[in-house]
């Protein structure tokens, strides 16, 4: 059912204005229309002139949901540390209770006042300047949202109203915004990649040392696993076009989630294969993804490498630690949990992983935010035990992960949504991209092989930035 039909928009808006007047408060009202599905990238590009630096994009690999958000009708942010999940949920609840005007209208999943954003990996890491625009939690309700849900298109317009507003102004504004669906400013050929000036792998020696230190801590049984990352800085001759990057990620990484979150100066972008948690009604889905090997140059070589990965003790241990922790977390929040005994393979253009999907039926009252708090960081991004591995990362890694390897995603007014971990990603600022890649260290890790693995993991972003990936891919 569509929330608001055209005839009802006038009525709905005027009631919202009246409500704002009675409460002497600003209200947010959401108008949703069913529209013919369009190319979401065109919508994103059309938003450049009016909403550049305030856009987001999301597409999951099943294409169950695609979102393009433009502008900011409402923003939530938190400076809290480990309480950032709870604080965000508290603000979201307050927004729904005090600010949102719905008049009991039902919204289709993924439409209306949708919240999109993310969290920092570790609020207690020192802050680096390229993450200035990102707080420990930052979420937006866009002014305009294009949703494609299971093949249906929707346009949601989120409008702030106050008691003195003139309804005609709002109706005119809605009409203008609808123009974004048809004014095609985007012509794929007009976007190109600027030339690469320099590509700098940062502090490889330090990474090598970190891996050695971590393996010896693991051999001494101080911890079981820790995920260590490194950075690569790519500098171009001109400002990077995010349209171009998203276009390439969509084309080259169809088995990953493509996302971007824009800010004033810094944009976080990537194509992650790793779901953290999805909630659909009473069901939740998580993914254990850890253990990696390169893709083969031929079908035969690829299958052999896949078999090697499925039988490799070092990678199976990396993977098992994740399965264990996620199962334990899900058991606490679910009435039943389904999880296969053995991993299978998950392939992306540049790499293949060990993969175990998890499905659970939640206990009453469990929310997406409570699951995020419980799960993040899983041993696929942090380590095990969680607390000890986080303090090792804090001590060894000489940089701020910011939103890299942290939850990013969406939640709608019905409480459904999905969060992934922001890996195979980077933060773009004008002509510079800072990329991140990490790997799970266990007792049998060697600096050389972990260096190789992280080199492969830079490739999705390097390739999207302009076809400059290294290696035989
Ligand atoms: C940390 C990253 O990836 C994680 C580490 C993996 C591994 O070490 O095998 C595999 C998938 C991800 O869970 C990354 O891509 O940056
Ligand atoms: Mg690994």
Image (cartoon, grey):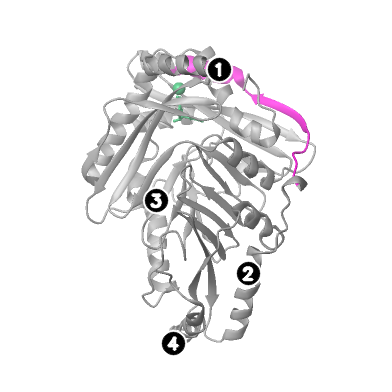
Q: Is residue 117 magenta?
A: no
Residue 213 picture location, percent across and down: 46, 16
Residue 127 picture location, percent across and down: 56, 41
Q: Quadrant of residue 326?
A: top left
Magenta segment, which residues?
191-214
**Is residue 126 shown to the viewer in this render?**
no
The image shows residue 74, relative to residue 199, as above or below, that is below
Q: Earlier in the sequence, mark 4 or mark 2?
A: 4
Residue beneath the point at 53% across and 36% down: 401
* Residue holding disc 3: 85
Q: Earlier in the sequence, mark 3 or mark 1?
A: 3
What is the quadrant of the N terminus in the image?
bottom left
Residue beneath the point at 47% across and 16% down: 305
* Residue holding disc 1: 298
| 270 vs 234, nearest the viewer | 270
Horizontal relation, residue 52 to residue 345: left or right: right
Q: Earlier in the sequence, mark 2 or mark 1?
A: 2
């Amino acid at each position: 059912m569509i929330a608001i039909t055209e005839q009802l928009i006038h009525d709905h808006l005027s009631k919202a204005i009246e409500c704002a007047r009675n409460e002497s408060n600003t209200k947010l009202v959401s108008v949703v229309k069913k529209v013919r599905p369009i190319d979401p990238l065109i919508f994103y590009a059309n938003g450049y002139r009016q909403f550049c630096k305030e856009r987001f994009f999301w597409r999951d690999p099943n294409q169950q949901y695609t979102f393009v958000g433009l502008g900011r009708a409402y923003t939530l942010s938190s400076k809290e540390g480990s309480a950032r999940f709870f604080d965000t949920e508290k603000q979201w609840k307050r927004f729904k209770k005090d600010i949102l005007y719905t008049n009991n209208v039902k919204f289709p999943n993924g439409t209306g006042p949708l919240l999109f954003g993310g969290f920092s990996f570790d609020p207690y890491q020192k802050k680096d300047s390229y993450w200035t625009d990102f707080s420990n939690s930052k979420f937006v309700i866009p002014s305009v949202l294009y949703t494609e849900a299971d093949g249906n298109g929707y346009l949601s317009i989120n409008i702030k109203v106050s008691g003195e507003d003139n309804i005609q102004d709002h109706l005119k504004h809605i009409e203008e915004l609808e123009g974004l669906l048809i004014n095609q400013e985007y012509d794929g050929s007009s976007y190109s990649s600027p030339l690469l000036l320099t590509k700098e792998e940062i502090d490889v020696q330090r990474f090598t040392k970190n891996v050695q230190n971590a393996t010896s801590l693991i051999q001494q049984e101080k911890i079981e696993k820790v995920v260590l990352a490194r950075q690569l800085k790519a500098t171009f001759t001109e400002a990077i076009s995010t349209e171009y990057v998203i276009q390439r990620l969509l084309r080259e990484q169809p088995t990953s989630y493509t996302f971007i979150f824009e800010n004033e100066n810094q944009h976080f972008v990537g194509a992650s294969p790793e779901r953290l948690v999805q909630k659909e009604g009473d069901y939740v889905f998580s993914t254990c993804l850890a253990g990696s090997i390169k893709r083969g140059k031929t079908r035969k070589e690829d299958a052999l490498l896949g078999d090697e990965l499925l039988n490799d003790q070092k990678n199976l241990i990396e993977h098992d630690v994740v399965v264990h922790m996620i199962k334990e977390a899900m058991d606490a929040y679910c009435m039943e949990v389904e999880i296969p005994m053995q991993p299978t393979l998950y392939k992306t253009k540049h790499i293949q992983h060990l993969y175990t999907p998890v499905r659970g039926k939640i206990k009453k009252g469990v929310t997406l935010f409570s699951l995020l708090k419980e799960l993040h960081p899983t041993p696929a991004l942090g380590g095990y035990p969680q607390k000890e591995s986080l303090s090792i990362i804090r001590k060894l890694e000489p940089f701020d992960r910011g939103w890299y390897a942290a939850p990013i995603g969406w939640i709608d007014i019905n409480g459904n949504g999905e969060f992934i971990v922001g890996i195979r990603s980077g933060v773009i600022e004008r002509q510079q991209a800072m990329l991140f890649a990490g790997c799970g260290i266990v007792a049998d890790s060697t600096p050389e092989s972990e260096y190789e693995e992280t080199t492969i993991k830079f490739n999705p972003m390097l390739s999207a930035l302009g076809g400059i990936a290294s290696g035989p891919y």
